[in-house]
Amino acid sequence: MNLNLSQNRSIQFFSVMCLISVIGLLTIWVLPGTIAFRHVLLVIGFISSLVIIYKSNFFLRRNFLDLLPLIFLALIFIWAIVHYLWFSLNPALEFQELKSLWLRALVGSVIAIGLSITLRIKKNLRPYFFISLFLVSWINLMAYFYLSYEAEKFLLPGDFVRKFAFKKIEAGFFGVIAIAIACSNLLNLMSQKLDKKSAIYSALWFFGITVAIISSVVANTKNGVVVALGLCVLFGFTLIYRALLGAEVLRAKMFMPIVFVFLLLLAGWKIHMQFASQGWSTLIEDIQISSQIDKHNFWRFNSKDWTKVYEKESFPINSSGLDVAGNTYERVSWATQGLLLIKQYPMGYGSINRSFVGMLNYAGIKQELESQTHSGWIDFGLAFGIPGLCIFLILFSSIVYKGLRNGDQFGLMGAWLIIGFAPFGLIAEINYKHNFEILLFFIAFAAVSTISFRRP
């Protein structure tokens, strides 16, 4: 690399432009009616990132193993084109998505690569990116307090979600992203010498985790809360493991963070259970009943149209004599049917946004659905088949392995992002519309972050 890389004026300018575009995207990605502005930011970020990638020589003289995660990321895009050419069950729809959704995802991935390089060249820009990760959580919370002020009472999470523009998935999705990066940075800080500066940074990261969890709670998102708290559990046990293996001074340094994490877990879970929709107490039995899709037909309709089924049959009940929780019923029954369709059509349908309904129609299954399965990985399997899922599996494995093996700040961020995405994608529709763009953006960021930075 150029010895004066961090002082290079063009690198400085395009680094700032890249960061500005990313912060803008992170702010408006989840807001409706912002597609034109998103395109402007994508163009700015794309051009800036190409300049950064070229001038930094970041990929110069890299070997095959260094680039393995990025190669598997590229295979996702290549498979999408191959699928359209030879395996598509709806070529017109798939082509439309290739030149819109997939193109934006590709541009976003290039921006993510440029961002990771930028943050390693220009350390002074890192705080702005880290703060922007929590913007969605803050917007969500500010909206909650404002709407509660208008109502002259604290709104219940279910009432708040119906009033605000965000969907539950978006608060949960960005909460998982922010918490994953917070946990990785905390682990990096705690592997270093404890001083006043690192103590302040640690406190800010813990504050950010708290904000993200509260945002998921008020958004009434089960999947977001579960995965967010799951990341905190993993973080807490990682601290305990390090403390047990470390010297006495290390144990003393870990004590307060461990206590804070588990108190946060307890508080977050208790508050969520207080206001969450029904279903937790009978979850296992509800899952078993909901998976028996040959015994009931409510899954063929969205909940607003269940009256069409009530005329012929009763809603499934559990051993407590209660109706199976509606949200559990939908997710499990749709996931069950989705898995059956993947088995029947292992090469996939070809559409990100219409994979479930499209495949149901193609298979001649009677239904009037308007949604996906609510499981991102099943949705992607329906769209691009078992080969597409295998590429994702290998990609994720390579990122986690290389990130943890690398062990530095950026390697850990890459690994923890994937550790968050893997379970969240099982229970949330992250492969749908702009969520798919966000997912590939952060996967690209994770992939390039596992590549060690060669200092000049």
Image (cartoon, rainbow, N blue to C red):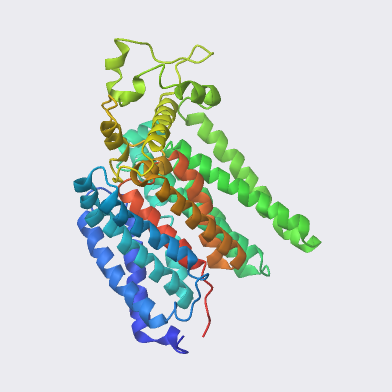
Q: Residue 160 appears at what percent x and percent y?
A: 36, 35
Q: Is residue 132 visible?
A: no
Which residue is situated farthest in the right direction here? 248
Which residue is painted at 59% across and 44% down in the image? 264
Q: Residue 330 appears at what percent x and percent y?
A: 39, 28
Which residue is painted at 42% across and 66% down in the image? 128
Total marks placed: 0
Q: Residue 180 appears at what percent x and percent y?
A: 52, 54
Q: Is residue 38 left or right of residue 296?
A: left
- Residue 184 sits in quarter: bottom right
Q: Is residue 96 left or right of residue 319?
A: left
Which residue is situated farthest in the front direction here? 86
- Please name whichever residue, 439 or 35, is drawn nearer the observer in this view of the structure: 439
Say above or below: 197 vs 142. Answer: below
Say above or below: 302 vs 314. Answer: below
Say above or below: 304 vs 5. Answer: above
Which residue is situated farthest in the bottom direction here? 3
Say above or below: 124 vs 37. Answer: below
Q: Is residue 226 left or right of residue 388?
A: right
Q: Residue 442 appears at what percent x and percent y?
A: 42, 58
- Please name whichever residue, 329 or 349, is drawn nearer the observer in this view of the structure: 349
Which residue is painted at 39% across and 86% down in the image? 8
Q: Is residue 377 visible?
A: yes
